Amino acid sequence: MAAISSTTPATTPAPAPATAQGGRRTLRRVLWGAQILLAVFLFAGSALPKFAGQAEAVRTFEEIGWGQWFRYVTGAVEAAGAIGLVVPRLAGLAAVGLIGLMAGAAATQLLVLSAPWAALPAAFAVVFAVIAWDRRAETGALLRAGLGAQRRR
């Protein structure tokens, strides 16, 4: 009969916390890159043309049929979301709001404009969901602080 060595571990040790932290740090850096790119796109590529009355934006909102006021509201929501994405405390909350905006954009593409283009806002919504999930601690703290301030009034 073979003797079992007392120096051989019976189980594989759990990964070191530093490994988990390293992966989390990498995810956070990748998401910051995505947040910055999305913020630039939302602000410069989407909100500003709506505010400036670019012909394509005006035509699109005429086709939607809700009036040009809706173009300005949509641009304002995009601009606010873009700014929120690059403010660490607001990034998660901004991402949640942008998920709603992208859901509306996807539905509008499907029902009114061009169905194949619904995939783009749907893909953006998935990225915003990952950002919101990653920033859930900050969002929770922000919401708790807001509720605490309301209760003190």
Image (cartoon, rainbow, N blue to C red):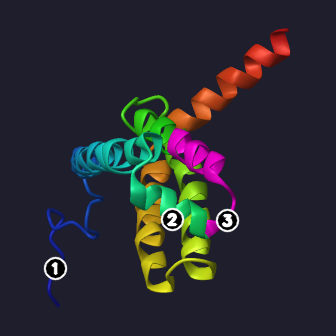
State the mark number for residue 60. 2
Q: Main secondary structure of the magenta part?
A: helix
| Residue closest to the eye, 82 or 11 | 82
How far apart marks 2 and 1 lie (CA) works out to 78 Å
Q: Which residue is mark 1?
A: 3
- Specify start and end residues of the magenta stretch as a single range: 64-77
As for residue 16 lying within the magenta part, the answer is no
Q: Residues within 10 Å of mark 1 (few under 14, many from 20)?
A: few
Foreground pick, 122 / 105: 105
Element class at badge 2: helix
Q: Callout 1: helix, strand or loop?
A: loop
Q: Residue at x 29, y 43 (%)?
A: 40
| Residue at left offset 18%, top offset 64% | 6
Q: Is residue 3 above or below residue 24?
A: below
Instruction: Determine which of the numbered discs, if any, sits on residue 65 in the image.
Output: 3
Disc 2 crowd rating (10 Å Cα; few below 14, some 14-19, many 20+) is some
Which residue type does callout 2 highlight?
Answer: Thr
Residue ID at (49%, 52%): 133
Q: Is residue 2 above or below residue 24?
A: below
Residue type for callout 3: Gly
**Left or right of 121 in this view: 20:** left
Q: Is residue 103 left or right of residue 34?
A: right
Residue 87 can be seen, yes or no: yes
- Mark number, residue 74: none
Label 1, label 3: how many angstroms apart (C-alpha)? 82 Å
Q: Position of residue 39 (x, y in %)?
A: 34, 43
17 and 109: which is toward the camera: 109
Give above or below for 35 relative to 113.
above
